[in-house]
Image (cartoon, helix red, strand yellow):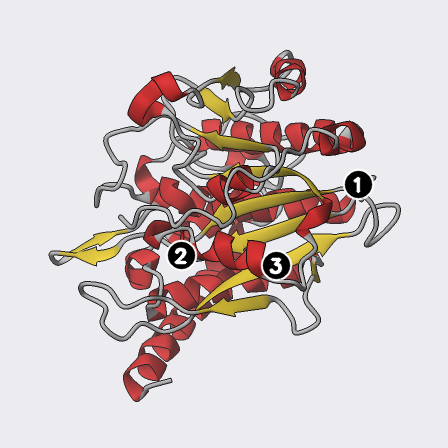
Amino acid sequence: MTSKRAFALAAFLGFAAILLGGFLLLQGRKADELPGVTYEPVYVDAGPMLHLVDVLASDALEGRAAGTPGNEAARGFIRKRFEDIGLTPYLDSGWEQPFAILPREGLANPGPGANLIGWVPGETPGAGPMIVVTAHFDHLGIREGQIYNGADDNASGSAALVAMADYFVRHPPRHDILFAALDGEEVGFLGARALMRDPAIDLSRAALNINLDMVSRSDAGELYASGTFHTPQLADLIAGVALTAPVKLLMGHDRPEDGPNDWTMQSDHAVFHAAGIPHLYFGVEDHPGYHQPSDDFAEITPDFYVRAADTLVSVALAGDAMLPQIYALRRTPAEPDQPEGTPE
């Protein structure tokens, strides 16, 4: 680590001590005590989840671009939450799965990237089908002097992933669930590709990828599940959850005729899709803050976000209940290698 990177990281860690006070204030508060939240969640702890989004999307982390000290600091915050909720590291080496970040315009000498991987054992740990829940924590960084904080994209998915992990640590599932906070999505799905290629992670057991990317901002209260076009048998699962979901849970954005609104290859689930693993990608439709400096914590829809997180736990529970049947839906990989993605 260069002295400049070490100094920057030390500054971020100092900032963490200040933010911890805010986390303790939010912990354990009821929904009606949280600004903008009226819904009382059934599954997730709303206060810590909202606070983590606020932290990850703060100016101090400078947009969390892959290979930067701000991204490394974000990884540290998520790792601390994994530890606090009692999640178990999946790899023998610990939480992190490192990989190289390629130089790019504005970042000629990036630091390494790393995924954070934990798991909750099921009734037969290490055997049988498993669910893989993913969300990327990197964003666009600083461009032309403006910080792209990426509150919805994708601090929201990262914090929801932690909230889901917290629930399943407290309420163990039938089948193993892998929770992977992924780096490098914005520069070509690098973290997802590293996850797929690591022989220490047996993704031959993966029955379903649940990918979370932009789940906190919808004035219409709509959350989309994309992927049922490619695995039609999952439509009944989504329809069943939608009957009682606290958000309007819709299906779509996964057909070739949708053109640029086909989300199939637009986030980390693309890597799982290419490998023949059924996926459900959850997100909101594009809003004025998408890939703009205005994607700040103040612009998310907190009540919708808490409702969406509860809905995501419901989906995971439904998937866990029928996971052997979902595993049977795996397809032959469409490509010999994983997609490179399109750097933003």
**Mark 3 closeness class: few <14, some 14–19, many ≥20 residues within 10 Å:** many
| Mark nearer the N terminus (1 vs 2) | 1
Which residue carries the number 3 mark?
A: 117
| Disc 1, SS | loop
Quadrant the N terminus occupies: bottom left
| Mark nearer the N terminus (1 vs 3) | 3
Q: Residue at x 73, y 34 (%)?
A: 327
Q: Say if mark 3 contacts mark 2, CB within 8 Å.
A: no
Which residue carries the number 2 mark?
A: 184
Left or right position of 172 against 188: right
Q: Locate residue 213, reporting x and y percent.
A: 44, 39
Q: Residue at x 77, y 42 (%)?
A: 129
Q: Is residue 287 above or below residue 292?
A: above
| Quadrant in the picture for residue 60 | bottom left
- Viewer-proximal residue among 69 and 123: 123
**Mark 1 closeness class: few <14, some 14–19, many ≥20 residues within 10 Å:** some
| Disc 3, SS | strand
Considering every residue shown, the one lying at the far front of the view is 336
- Cα separation between marks 1 and 3: 17 Å
| Disc 2, SS | loop
Q: Residue at x 67, y 28 (%)?
A: 314
User: Which mark's residue is nearer the viewer, 1 or 2?
Assistant: 2
- Viewer-proximal residue among 264 and 148: 264
**Mark 2 closeness class: few <14, some 14–19, many ≥20 residues within 10 Å:** many
Residue 173 marker: 1
Residue 336 marker: none
Q: Say if mark 1 contacts mark 3, CB within 8 Å.
A: no
The answer to whether residue 182 is visible is no
- Viewer-proximal residue among 34 and 228: 228
- Cα separation between marks 3 and 2: 14 Å
